[in-house]
Image (spheres, rainbow, N blue to C red):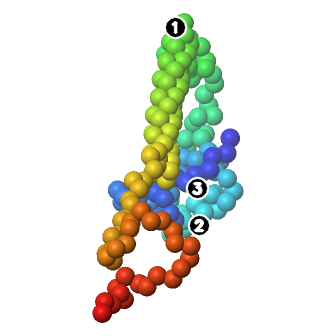
């Protein structure tokens, strides 16, 4: 199994962690076990040429692969204290039903929240559209204003005389008496 350790460490291409260790501090075991990709292996080897701490870490655990190769499945089972070689503890018979119930509950809650938020958004949108339409198209016509202007009447003129057939009348302000 190949393990990429490219993204191990802080974001960016920095070589120093916050606690003072550099980004290759955890690569020694992966390097010795041969689980680094070729590009990562070359990077680590280039780094080790300049870093005495990483060289020392590799030297300290260099005997580990040989020692691990001496163990068989029964030895590992005995170390783990379990009766089977996989080393995995036996699972409870209630584990799967409880996990399924928990997943069902979370999905139900998520679905309910999604529907509730969607319904609230639809109500807000509907109200906004109705208010917007009422603002553009008022439901009652604007009040009509009537302007009346009074003209002064000349003497002897009847208001109810009606139309005089198109005869020219002198303007009200231009009537002169002798």
Residue 50: give x, y in percent of width and height: 50, 69
Is residue 4 visible in the rendered structure shown here? yes
Per the image, label 3 sits on a secondary structure element best described as loop
Say above or below: 87 vs 161.
Answer: above
Distance from label 3 to label 2 (Cα)? 15 Å
Question: Who's the residue at 48% across and 59% down the image?
Answer: 11
Dot 3, crowdedness within 10 Å: few (<14), some or many (≥20)? some
- The quadrant of the picture occupied by the N terminus is top right
Q: Which of marks 1 and 2 is nearer the N terminus?
A: 2
Choose top left, top right, bottom left or bottom right for residue 7.
bottom right
The numbered disc on residue 117 is: none
For disc 2, the neighbor class at 10 Å (few under 14, some 14 to 19, many from 20) is few
Front: mark 1 or 2: 1
Q: Is residue 84 left or right of 134 when viewed as pictured? A: right
Which mark is in front, 3 or 1? Answer: 1
Residue at image point 61% right, 18% down: 85
Distance of label 1 from label 2 (alpha carbons):
51 Å
Q: Residue 46 carries which label?
A: 2
> Residue at coordinates 39% horizontally, 53% vertically from top-left?
143
Viewer-nearest of discs 3 and 2: 3
Which is more toward the observer, 60 or 145? 145
In the displayed structure, does residue 60 sit left or right of residue 77?
left
Task: Identify the secondary structure beneath mark 2.
Answer: helix
Q: Name the residue under label 3.
A: 6
């Amino acid at each position: 199994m190949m393990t990429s350790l490219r993204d191990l460490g802080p974001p960016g291409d920095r070589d120093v962690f916050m606690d003072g260790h550099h980004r290759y501090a955890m690569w020694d075991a992966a390097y010795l076990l041969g689980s680094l990709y070729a590009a990562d292996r070359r990077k680590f080897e280039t780094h080790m040429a300049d870093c005495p701490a990483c060289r020392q870490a590799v030297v300290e655990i260099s005997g580990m692969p040989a020692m691990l190769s001496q163990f068989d499945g029964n030895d590992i089972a005995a170390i783990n204290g379990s009766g089977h070689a996989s080393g995995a503890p036996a699972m409870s018979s209630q584990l799967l039903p409880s996990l399924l119930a928990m997943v069902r509950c979370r999905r139900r809650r998520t679905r309910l929240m999604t529907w509730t938020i969607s319904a609230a958004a639809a109500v807000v949108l509907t109200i906004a559209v109705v208010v917007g339409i009422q603002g553009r198209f008022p439901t009652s016509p604007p009040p009509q204003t009537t302007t009346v202007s009074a003209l002064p009447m000349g003497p002897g003129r009847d208001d109810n005389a009606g139309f005089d057939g198109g005869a020219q009348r002198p303007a009200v302000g231009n009537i002169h008496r002798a």
